[in-house]
Amino acid sequence: MRVLIVDDEPSIRKTTRIAVETAGYAAAEAANGLRALKSLDEETFDAVFLDLKLGTDDGLEVLAKLLKAQPSLAVVMFTAYANIATAVEAMRRGAFDFIPKPFTPDQIRGVLAKIEKTRVLETRVRSLESELAREAPPTDLESAEPATRRALEIAFKAAETPANILILGPSGTGKSVLARELHRRSAQRDAAFITVSCPSLSRELLESELFGHVKGSFTGAVADAMGKVAAADGGTLFLDEIGELPLEIQPKLLRLLQEREYERVGESRPRHANVRVIAATNRDLAAEVKAGRFREDLYYRLNVITVVLPGLHERPGDLARMAESYRKFFSARLGKKITAFSPAVSTAFAGYRWPGNLRELRNVIERATILAGGDTLELCDLPEEFGAKPDLNIAVGARVTLDELEAEHLRRVLAICRNLDDAARTLGIDPATLYRKRQKLGLI
């Protein structure tokens, strides 16, 4: 790392420089804010040690200018006028850390080690994000359909505000993708985006996952857990499939939305969290309210801004573009040179209802790319429901065997579900049974 030392006292600069260089880092010096900014123009630095009382300069003002010039800079403030208020203000304005004078060489080396560790972690995160981007198709949040385009415009306008957002739409329409994009466009973009899948756990475990618990509050609670709400503090909490949130937990979520307060399981002390909530569901929440399965007051708290994502069959103007995007992505990822869809495939796509929406489109094109023998995706590369075997009419009441009917039902459920656990819940069986059935019917 390269470190810039900014202090109006030559002796402090010299002492700090010796500590920096003996730790194995390169160091440069500046006696005032103007010279520090000039140094940033001339060279790239990883860290800055900045004096709070810098002659006639205000160190906090210099801090703001340094971070504006190089936002990724780790700035460590030090001063003989150390107090908690000053430390808090410096950190609030973006300082990495705060060291009071007089300091020791070990303190300098300690904070440099912390900066380097943070840099390594940031590099790993960027690497993982890049890897994930290569593993996932590009996000497509555009539309040629007026209704969808209008829904996205509303969502993006609301993203810049702290308002709660409710995303409605069938499974597989990209609700979680949109939620993540709304976070990216929000004032909370630099904080955490935390997802909670409401149907994934029992009521007791879901409450603990959301709000956390204290040690001994229930069987298996061997240590304190902070919960997803605390993890999302200052950022975005995404509640996926909120229509399946148990009634017993709904008042606690309402309290969080209204008062920014919650309690961990097994604890009576209220805690505070400033979270922006985005919720999504494929259920009709208004109907759930009428049926008594969803609290009306919670519904209105969530329903500040509603965005409805239509199914893929309602977006014919977008189908060809999205299919083409998936074709390019999976061709590159799988090392195939697939250049086009055959006319028969394009016709089959246009006439299909797409019950699994974008998720199904992605799965179908990935499968077809794997099976393709040439440079064009053909009808025979698609699942049977697209007409690859037109003589086999598999439907309830058709002249087919139970195994054929079960296999077709499993194929369609697997196409529209997020994962095997979701498919097992939809079918009303456990994952192990689903695995055996897939094996028996040749679906693995």
Image (spheres, grey):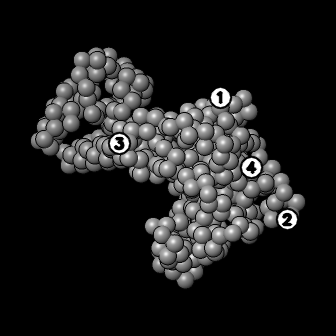
Asked if one can make out residue 345 in the rendered structure from this viewpoint, the answer is yes
The image position of residue 101, as x and y in percent, is 29, 40
Q: CA distance from mark 1 to mark 3?
A: 29 Å
Q: Earlier in the sequence, mark 4 or mark 3?
A: 4
In percent of the image, x 66 and y 52: which residue is there? 355
For label 1, count other residues whose C-alpha is less than 10 Å away and answer few (under 14), some (14-19) or many (20+): few
Give the mark toward the camera: 3 or 2: 3
The N terminus - image quarter: top left
In this rendering, position of residue 362 left or right of residue 267: left
Which residue is identified by label 1? 144
Q: What amino acid is at disc 1?
A: Ala
Q: What amino acid is at disc 2?
A: Gly
Quick check: marks 2 and 4 in contact, CB under 8 Å?
no
Give the mark toward the camera: 2 or 1: 1
Which residue is identified by label 2? 292
Q: Earlier in the sequence, mark 1 or mark 3?
A: 1
Give the mark toward the camera: 1 or 3: 3
Quick check: marks 1 and 3 in contact, CB under 8 Å?
no
Q: Which mark is residue 302?
A: 4
